[in-house]
Image (cartoon, rainbow, N blue to C red):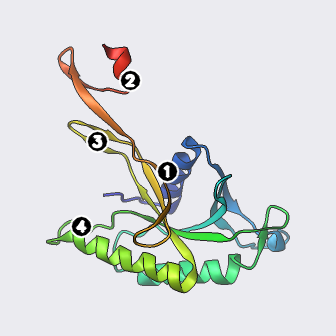
Amino acid sequence: MDKFNLEIEFVDKVEKCLKDHGYQTFREVIPDQCINWEKPYRVDLIFYHKDYGYIGVEAKNTDTLRSGGVISDAIDQIDTKYRNKTFFNGNMIEKWAIMLPSRTGWEHHENAREIEIEVMSFVKNFLSKRYNIYILEYSAEINYASGNKSPEVCLCQNATKNLFRIGGEWTPKIYLNGKWVSNNNPKKLF
């Protein structure tokens, strides 16, 4: 399960994954209209890619599916504080997302993963249709006996359409010289 003690820890991991895949990232960005305020608004993360433009992100480190109030707060922040502002000397940001860990701690329930998928499908469709807000999901690295899956970031437009998915590469392990090793480049090993 992707569980983080602090939101900053979560955002750090997502930012690293984005940078590792060629995205420009900016943290704690102050809107142009708020620069001289004593306590300016700050967007948790804005990232840029030539194919998608700027995408603004409000991060919420939730560990339960019972976090409707937290998601509601994120919607309010995006709609009332950020969406009508400009950034980086006059740029409007058209795409906004709420960033959540992809696993939310229901492992002790029967059919937990199926329930979680259904609830998150509802949330994605609701946010997209009602508020034009995406979900940015992050899955940490997973280590299996047979290999590793790298960290993954997915910008979900709704339950069935992703704007993009990066990471999640599979690195198989092989048994070599008496131990299991990652097979990052099979041509070099043999």
Alpha-carbon span between mark 4 and mark 1: 23 Å
Estimate the x, y position of residue 68 in percent, counting from the top left. 42, 83
Alpha-carbon span between mark 4 and mark 3: 19 Å
| Residue that badge 1 annotates | 13
Quarter assignment of residue 1: bottom left
Q: Are marks 4 and 1 in contact (CB under 8 Å)?
A: no
Q: Is residue 159 left or right of residue 80?
A: left
Alpha-carbon span between mark 2 and mark 4: 33 Å
Q: Nearer the viewer, mark 4 or mark 1?
A: 4
| Identity of the residue drawn at 62% across and 48% down | 23
Alpha-carbon span between mark 3 and mark 2: 18 Å
Question: Which comes before the other along the chain, label 3 or label 2?
Answer: 3
Q: Is residue 163 above or below residue 14?
A: below
Q: Is residue 158 left or right of residue 49?
A: left
**Count of numbered marks:** 4
| Residue that badge 3 annotates | 143
Residue 37 showing in the rendered view: no
Q: Amino acid at mark 1?
A: Lys
Q: Amino acid at mark 4?
A: Arg
Q: Nearer the viewer, mark 2 or mark 4?
A: 2
Provide the secondary structure element on which disc 1 rests.
helix
Quarter assignment of residue 69: bottom left
Check the picture and name the quadrant holding the C terminus.
top left
Q: Is residue 119 above or below residue 136?
A: below
| Residue that badge 4 annotates | 113
Question: Which comes before the other along the chain, label 4 or label 1?
Answer: 1
